Image (cartoon, rainbow, N blue to C red):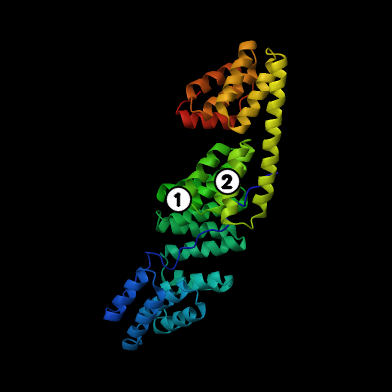
Amino acid sequence: MHRYKKIFISAILSCIFSANVHSQVVQTASSDKAKDYYEKQMYLQAITEFTKSLQAEPRNPELYYWRARCFVAEHNYRHAFSDFDKALILNPRFSEVYNARGVVYLQEGALEEAIADFNKAIAINPEYAEAYNNRGFVYAKKGSFELAVIDFNNAIRINPYNADVYYNRGFVFAQKGDLGQVVAYLNKVVELNPTYAPAYYNRGLAYAKRGNFDWAIRDFDKAVSINPYYTEAYYNRAVAYAEKGNYDEAIIDYDKALKLNPELTQAQDNKALAQTKRTSLLKAIEQFDKLIQQNPRYTQAYYNRGIAYLKRGNLKKAVDDFDKALLLNAKEPLAYRERAVAFFYLRRYDDAWRDVRQARALGADISPIFLEELQEASGKQE
């Protein structure tokens, strides 16, 4: 059985490198140069220049704060903590430092210390959206979902345009298994930030878990177009293709995932399974070929071969076989229903609607998910 990766590997922190963090570093030649290095992500050079500035301004908490940010970027947390502490000795009401230090505590797994620092940041600045978001993140990580939602709501109240917060609320609903709310919040994320690859990826997973494989594939497509190295998106798109019976495309995506991560054993296992099922379909088609050669008026053989072609993604051959089945028996409801699916994938939406109506008139059940997809793609209601 092909299995999906878990929805939401993690939520998103409001990073201490956020543009919403305001600073007023003393304007010296060294600090100007340091800021320039920082913006270029040349953190070691920035540390050198901030150190020079501190020699001239040893009691400037902003300089310690900025140098700490550079240390964090270099994963040198020991020196980062030291500089954060010095900044707070010089300015005990420096809310951005508490928020930034809280993030580092969280990255180190010290959740209670992180909460304590976010509490202090919020006590100093009750309108600190990033601190609410970060504290909500910690609460969600601890499983305290109600407290997390309260904090995320406060962050949204203060800044309704921060996509990270909506993403994190989606994370909470994912833990609760409420996929409808997951999709709703991720819709808001991509509305605010159309290049937010994890949002497309996780929305795709939510669609897939609801059985809406075509919408899932569409979102995985978007995720890998934004980030071509998104291993999980290739893997889960492969799973969605396999669920649809499109084993050729599934194998291609499993290969892409394995190229990025050769140790992904799930992809190895699933690729082997897809190859086995693809071989079975080919053998089934060969058997239907023989039956049709023996009896060219064998309606069920055309129908079944059409299903096999549809599962393989060979849409035109599928339509041809359903056409032949319906020429032999114009009252076969399932042939209309499956041909509607093939027409949908071929983007022949009017033909798909026509077959849906005919299939229903003859007593066939139509999947509500398929109808929703057809309505969305065609822009028409039944």
How many other residues sit within 10 Å of disc 2, few (<14), some (14-19) or many (≥20)?
many
Residue 282 falls in which quadrant of the image?
A: top right
Task: Residue 95 in the image: state x and y as whole percent.
Answer: 42, 73
Q: How many labels does the image show?
A: 2
Circle 2: element type: helix
How far is mark 1 from mark 2, CA to CA? 16 Å
Image height of 181 relative to 368, above or below: below
Toward the viewer: 179 or 257? 257
Q: Mark 1 points at which residue?
A: 226
Residue at 46% over, 28% down: 378
Of the image marks 1 and 2, the number of the one nearer the N terminus: 1
Residue at 40% over, 74% down: 43
Task: Residue 346 in the image: state x and y as whole percent.
Answer: 51, 28
Circle 1: element type: helix
Image height of 365 relative to 147, above or below: above
| Amino acid type assigned to the residue bearing label 1 in the image | Ile
Residue 324 falls in which quadrant of the image?
A: top right
Task: Residue 347 in the image: state x and y as whole percent.
Answer: 48, 28
Q: Name the residue under label 2.
A: 253
Examine the rendering and report whether any part of residue 172 can be seen.
no
Examine the rendering and report whether any part of residue 272 can be seen.
yes
Q: Is residue 12 left or right of residue 158?
A: right
Q: In this view, does 236 lie to the left or right of 165?
A: right
| Amino acid type assigned to the residue bearing label 2 in the image | Asp
| Quadrant including the N terminus | top right
